[in-house]
Image (cartoon, rainbow, N blue to C red):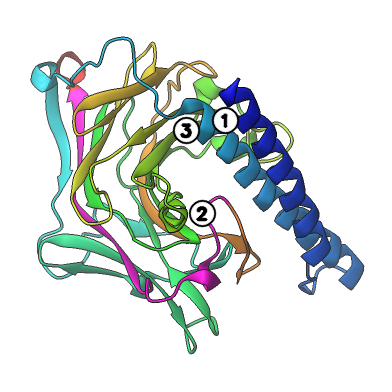
Amino acid sequence: MKNTVKKALALLLCLCLLGTAAFFSVPVCAKEKTPAEQWAKTAFDKFVNVLIDVIHRGIVLVRYPWEPKEAHTIDLSGFTLVFEDSFEGSVLDERCWSHYHPGIRKGGYWDEAQTVLRDGCLVIRSEYLPDGKYGAGYYTDRIDTRRKYLQTYGYFECRCILPAAQGLWSAFWLSSENIANGVPGTQGTEIDVFESPLYYRGIYGLENGLVTSNLHYGGYELGHRYRNVTVAKAQSPYSQFNTYGLEWNENEYIFYINGIETGRSSFGGVSKVPEYMLLSTEFDGVGGQPFYGWSGIATRNRDELPAEFIVDYVRAYQYTDRVE
């Protein structure tokens, strides 16, 4: 009964949020569209932003706490380490990583100047800059191994500290060139090893040491298909290092935090094509302007910004019997 009441209240809250989003939508002009068309697109994008939050609130309510029937621990005895970057030195290793799509990204901007190496770690800094490269706004970054290192199957792991602020989230994920073309999941799936949109829950006294693991395929338009695999707790993720891992085999994806399984899925059919790794932070919003979403809203931060996504290492292992 309690769960039914909670779900009903969550639905009511969602409807209120959707109404608020529609009412407060503000147009942003773009050269390629008339003002009316751009207003409609911006309003729709904001609606989607809030809808994502609505759906995600329901997922957190239903899925957490979630425990697998058997809490497996990752066994690396059958794997061989084939990729490792511990981010030593003073500059990013361009043999492995690239900056991709600089400029507007949702509620802010991606700018390679926001990524540095410091004390043996990669640091992606997220902050408001009144005189940033693309004008005043919220700046962060993304790097990936696109066109430099791709792998099919194996175990992938990132050890990191998450950025402690709302209105943004960090992620370690895998993707392929095919996904945007709307192909089936077997021909490319976005595999979100972790995403961290829940810092803001702590403001309301709720558990915010949670991360989500998700799967997407079929492109990012009407054919898009999505599955949340799990919502799971890390150990003080905004102040301590945790490891987030993915085992990807021919049958399923298995997700781990600190070597302990948190969930598994074969949603969409398992990807059978090479995929590259990504590290990113992004701000909730539309057209470079912050707006409320599943991670809150950046303008409500007080002293939280700048916030840093600190990565100790990224590793990829291959099944030993597949190593050439």
The answer to whether the residues at label 1 and label 3 have Cβ atoms under 8 Å apart is no
Is 202 located above or below residue 234 in the figure? Answer: below
Quarter-wise, where is residue 288 in the image?
bottom right
Q: Secondary structure at mark 1?
A: strand
Q: Residues within 10 Å of mark 3 (few under 14, many from 20)?
A: many
As measured in the structure, the alpha-carbon distance from the residue carrying label 2 to the one carrying label 1 is 22 Å
Nearer to the camera, 152 or 263? 263
- Front position in the image: 171 or 223: 171
Q: Is residue 283 left or right of residue 29?
A: left
Residue at (60, 40) in percent of width and height: 180
Q: Is residue 308 above or below residue 47?
A: below
- Residue 52 in percent (x, y) is at 63, 44
The residue where tag 3 is placed is 214
- The picture places residue 14, in percent across and down from the top left corner, at 70, 44
Q: Quadrant of the N terminus?
A: top right
Q: Earlier in the sequence, mark 3 or mark 2?
A: 3
Q: What residue is at 84 percent from the left and 66 percent from the top?
A: 39
Instruction: Give the residue drawn at x 55%, y 63%.
Output: 297
- The amino acid at mark 3 is Asn
Residue drawn at (43%, 20%) of the image: 272
Was residue 316 drawn as part of the magenta stretch in this picture? yes
Q: Visible in this render: residue 83?
A: yes
Residue 282 location (% of width, % of height): 47, 59
Q: Is residue 249 left or right of residue 87?
A: right
Residue numbers of the magenta segment: 294-318
Q: Residue 323's spot in the image, x, y percent?
A: 17, 22
Kind of element beneath mark 2: loop
Q: Amino acid at mark 1?
A: Tyr
Q: Which residue is mark 2?
A: 295
